[in-house]
Amino acid sequence: MTRKHYIYCYRSGCGRRRQPTHVSSLDALELAVRNKFGGKGHPYGLKYPEKQELLGALLEGLAGARRAAELPDSDYLYRICNVEDFIYNTQYPLSLSDLNEPDLSTKVWGILHTESNGQWRPVPGGSGKQYAGCGKISWWTDLPLPLDIVTSGLKIGMCTNWLIDRSILMRCKVSHIRASRLAYVPTILDAFCQMIFHPRHESKNPSSGTAIDLSRPGPLSTGASEFILYPIDCGQLEFLPISIPSDMKKDYKEHHDNHQKLLGKLLDYYADISAS
Amino acid sequence: MTDDKNPPQGEKPHDEMNDDDYSIEGVAEDTAAVITELIESPSVTLWKLELQHVVNGGRDEQLFRAGNAGAYIRTLWAEMGDEADARAMFHEALNEFIQEWTPWAGENASVLSNILSLIGAFTPPVGFTKIAGYFTYGDWSHLKAVPHVGMGVELDLQLKALATLRSYYRVAPVDDSKAAFKTYLRILRQNLARPQYFGFAASQLLALGQIKTDDAIFAEGLKRWPHSLHEIIPPLLSPHYRETAQYDLGKIYSYCMPVESQAFRIFEEVVQSRGGVISRDSQPVIRDGIVDDYWEPEPIILLADGGKIEVNLSHEQMIEYVESRETTGVSQFGAEMLAEQGKRINEFITQYIDTHWYSGHEISLKPLREELYVRGVKLQINRDMGLGYIHFLETNQTAPLELPKATFDTLLGVLYTPKRNIHKRMLYKVA
């Protein structure tokens, strides 16, 4: 068995104990992984259509079962994503040939960067369209990501190879999210296909999710707050193209998602919280 | 053997695994081990193996994270000790990999999409030859692929292949007699006859200075396939083409007339989708004591970056344009219909102000103006007389602006208050 498979096992046990209301759904997902996607023994390498097939309907059906999050007093929630995620899921107005550009993260990022001129910009023609990811949710944080993007990314549980050299930051006003009741506490089902997730005790009525901080040396610990958001009106979003060159990550060579040391630290983390 | 419901308790399972994360049978089958080996000891052979995985779907999760194959490769470079060495080996591996590839019509769509992504991102010399060579006897217009990220999006792989060739010639080369560039131009010209690809081909040939907006082939294609405006207009709105845009956009504007045609509607849609507005009037004029915007027929495209492009029409085109504006084909409103239209607009404005302009919320006139423009109206307000009118742009008729007093006061407050004081005024909004 591989480290990732052990991580999956520990996460499963830990998740069941901490979020018992989702056990039956977790059973169904784990059975599907074994029967249909059983090759690797865990869901951490599924393709997007497979994740959508596995989780899409389930996560959409969870709408009434998630706990509403209590939002912080900060002005914005933030998200970092790649260019494709931003372009396709906001239906950004691009020509067909630009949408079919073989390397969107170079040419189209360049266009966005020029249009943005280093400033936060609204999504053109955004009003009336909605932004969401797999299962009609997306992951956000109140940690101000633009400040030291690499460290911030690690604090929200992102591996260095997930911080793409040409990325897009998004932000949405907390006041809008609060008024539209879009923010929820992430569940173990939302994070089923994600290797890095801290399951909170539902009995303690958490007000938000908490990420795993990958930025510190030594054992892993909890990190910044994280939230699930339901589909957001793109007219309420602003974006900022951001460059993350490789030398910004040079101090974090062991923080990519296949590095044995990181996998070992994750395994230790989940083993420790499994006991509590 | 552990199962999902009973993970190992107490002692962690490290002793059951070696550092290379082999399975019990001793075969390295986990992606982590393969990628780690590449990062720690890159070689041309390992890069070619990795390219196989990328192309054949073995790295779809990584591509999902990165967005596309090119971005994924760059993440690997960033993890490697000697990035320069890693890049050199990668390029050698990619060139060999593509040399060994045989394009064909029965290619798996996902595989082809990944190959095109790699070629487009890194432009290996042999990549152009492979694609252009295939186009001498085949095409991929029957193939569609779904990107790694994005819901409900489908990529046309013929268009993606054309866009991949574009990666080699975004501008004309210094020596435009090069055989490859001539081949590219030939491919583009061939695609001028295809409705799905006319827009792309025309746009590229314009950018490369190989055709002009005056050319008959351009004008005829555009009139025949007005949806191609979605491809042709956006580059002309870019700051890079501002010098020539005035002439080219004017030509295209004239081809799209009359204003009630589908082509004109698409022209406006594309400009608006890029954050621009086609302004058909400019200076305000006072008539009978009432402020009234004076409609001037010369259209100006106002751009999101603050730029302006004057659409200079010829005298004949101007006459045609003005005549078409005066008789748009929409019949003048009868009195009853005018009242009904006015009532609907009044209701819309009331609802908009009550919903969006409240204490603590950032207030801006621009969204309201845009919403009204989309509905074909403008507002005319006379503060001194406390009167307002709804001006219908298509028919040039007006209806009275009749809002609840508090809403009208709010509107006046926003219209006539310096921007910095808007929030302060809103705190004292009349109930």
Image (tube, helix red, strand yellow):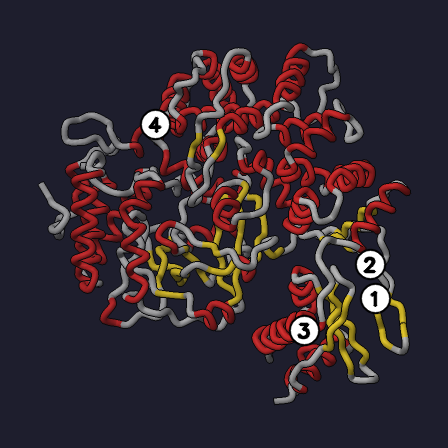
Q: CA distance from mark 2 to mark 4?
A: 65 Å
Task: Report x, y in % for residue B385.
Answer: 82, 84
Q: CA distance from mark 3 to mark 4?
A: 78 Å
Q: Residues within 10 Å of mark 2 (few under 14, many from 20)?
A: some
Q: Could you confirm whether marks 2 and 1 are on the same chain?
A: yes
SS under mark 3: helix
What numbered label is drawn on residue B37? 4
Q: CA distance from mark 4 to mark 1?
A: 70 Å
Chain ID at mark 1: B
* Residue under label 3: B336
User: Which image quadrant for residue B233?
Assistant: top right
- Amino acid under label 3? Glu
Chain ID at mark 2: B
Residue placed most toward the observer, A173 or B312:
B312
Q: Residue at x 23, y 46 (%)?
A: A7
Task: Report x, y in % for residue A149.
Answer: 51, 51
Q: Residues within 10 Å of mark 4 (few under 14, many from 20)?
A: some
SS under mark 1: strand
Task: Report x, y in % for residue B8.
Answer: 13, 48
Q: Do labels 2 and 3 touch, CB within 8 Å?
A: no
Task: Specify the quadrant that holds the C terminus of chain A.
Answer: bottom left
Residue A74 to residue B149: above or below: below
Q: Earlier in the sequence, mark 2 or mark 3?
A: 2
Q: Earlier in the sequence, mark 2 or mark 1?
A: 2
- Amino acid under label 1? Asp
Residue A21 to residue B347: above or below: above
* Residue under label 2: B281
Q: Earlier in the sequence, mark 4 or mark 1?
A: 4
Q: CA distance from mark 3 to mark 1?
A: 25 Å
* Residue under label 1: B293
Q: Residue at x 78, y 27 (%)?
A: B212
SS under mark 2: loop
